Image (cartoon, grey):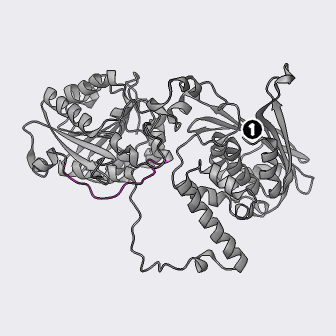
Amino acid sequence: MFLTITTTGNADRPATDLGFLLHKHPDRAQRFSTAHGTAHVLYPEANAERCTAALLLEVDPIALVRRSRGRGRGGAPDSALGQYVNDRPYAASSLLAVALRSVFATAMRGQCEARPELAAQALPLRVEVPVLPARGGAELVRKLFQPLGWTVLAEPVPLDETFPEWGDSRYVRLVLEGERTLAQALRHLYVLLPVLDDAKHYWVAPDEVDKLLRAGEGWLEDHPEQRLIVGRYLSRRWALTRRAMERLELERLAESDDVAAEEIDNAVDEEADTEERPVPLAVQRREAILTLLRAEKAARVLDLGCGQGQLVGALLKEVQFTEVVGVDVSMRALHEARRRLRLDRMSERQSERVRLVQGSLAYTDSRLKGYDAAVLSEVVEHVDPARLPALEYAVFGAARPRTVVVTTPNVEYNVRWESLPAGHVRHADHRFEWTREEFRQWAREVAARHGYEVSFAPVGPDDPEVGPPTQLARFRRAGEGGEGGARHSAGERNGSAEHNGSAERDGKSKSERNSGSSDRSGSVRGKEVAA
């Protein structure tokens, strides 16, 4: 995917000021890692009269399939090849929009510390996107961009220049010209690129409403195609669309009356409003695991399939856990965990408590022996069923920690997710999802084979008809009950223990999904990321 932004200038106001606004020096080519590939920023031309900044996004097709919101195992058989053979690496879409936000975040906010006066100045800009999907054709492209003050060239791309009789494709070459601030131009592109593609490559969660309204501030509330923009941007999730439209109408009314939106929307006394926001399911899951590990008096803990290190970070905040080891097959996930945990900035004493290790759970590993507890949080469903016995032996037969905690989705609860199509799993990388009975049968058989006792507990609201969104099993080596064991009643063993809290109905966030999509059943092992 490719996009260029060009401006012109003179000796008094050189065009190379574009480099200050983008926070990218014209004399250097730079590269940035994104969730789905590598973004490159370079300047094909840079002088006082004319300066062009180019954003090139190289998409990793394998990462794209694993992290997309695709059909998973519930998809139609003829869609399997379509996951790999498509226009995603070439045509501008939400992938490019996310790269814009990631690489030019400061510019999009309209900030320029080196030259603050530049951010508010309208510049003569030319934006070109060589290949842009346009579901609605060139006419829709003009309807979206012209009301924003752009001169629009939307030139249809023929299906095949050799056979003109085949007609035009659904793609256009887009050129925008006009005087806008750079921040305005970036926000227009960020919202409207995925709208024209009419697709999002990631799960649309409730926080997408806030992203849309932030990027659309100052132009979306009065746009004649507002409803189409909002509906497509939010992937036609009608509950979110309705919420966004209500907030946009409130902003419009406030602007008409020249008052703050809070003054109009004052029917609720904020001080008297004691309703609590629902706690995200990922947070409830981590808290359930931490509560159990505290009760087990565990000090040395393994996080098997640690992803980007959210649980590792939570464990490090508590002094009880004197050694925490995160294990994942994905080096990319481990590097991201290292960055999130800021291992390079930790004190020596703190860094001695944590290690990040590359390894596969499909193989026995002597480094994993001798620990008090191991956690497999949302991991087993990413493993092919044929490889589960290998994971089982590596953890329960070879490593043999005193306590093992396993969490996995409850497929019966999927009917409660309003955004999940019937018959689909929660994430494209899930090899399966178990019912409550299937999970308990697997857990009991594992416990019997390896000398463990097992008990069960729900995580999230325990629906009387379909159960909780997440199911948890706690394995303890037989005969090693101790103080922690006394806290788990026989009622828990029948699955009646409860963890308080409510699930976020729209499932995992974008970042949780990305961390869960690593192939945790791979064959790479043996490297350690130094703390």
Q: Quadrant of the C terminus?
A: top left
Q: Nearer the viewer, residue 136 or 474?
A: 136
Q: Residue at x 15, y 45 (%)?
A: 494
Within 10 Å of disc 1 (Cα), the crowding (few <14, some 14-19, many 20+) is many
Quarter of the figure with residue 175: top right
Q: Residue at x 65, y 52 (%)?
A: 105
**Looking at the image, is 360 positioned above or below residue 55?**
above
Q: Amino acid at mark 1?
A: Leu
| Image height of 214 relative to 259, above or below | above
In magenta, the rendered stretch is 496-509
Badge count: 1
- Residue depicted at 31% across the width and 22% down the height: 363
Q: Is residue 364 visible?
A: no
Task: Determine the residue positioned at 35% across, 49% down.
Answer: 350
> What residue is pinned by disc 1?
132
Across and down, in percent, residue 447 comes to: 16, 32
Q: Is residue 71 left or right of residue 40?
A: left
Q: Main secondary structure of the magenta part?
A: loop
Residue 213 is one of the magenta-drawn residues? no
Farthest residue in the left direction?
A: 479
Query: Residue 134 or 500: which is nearer the viewer?
Result: 134
Left or right relative to 45: residue 57: left
Q: What is the quadrant of the N terminus in the image?
A: top right
Instruction: Please provide percent x and percent y for residue 113.
Output: 70, 60
Q: Position of residue 253 (x, y in %)?
A: 68, 74
Q: Position of residue 258 (x, y in %)?
A: 71, 79
On the question of residue 187 being in view, the answer is yes
Label 1 secondary element: strand
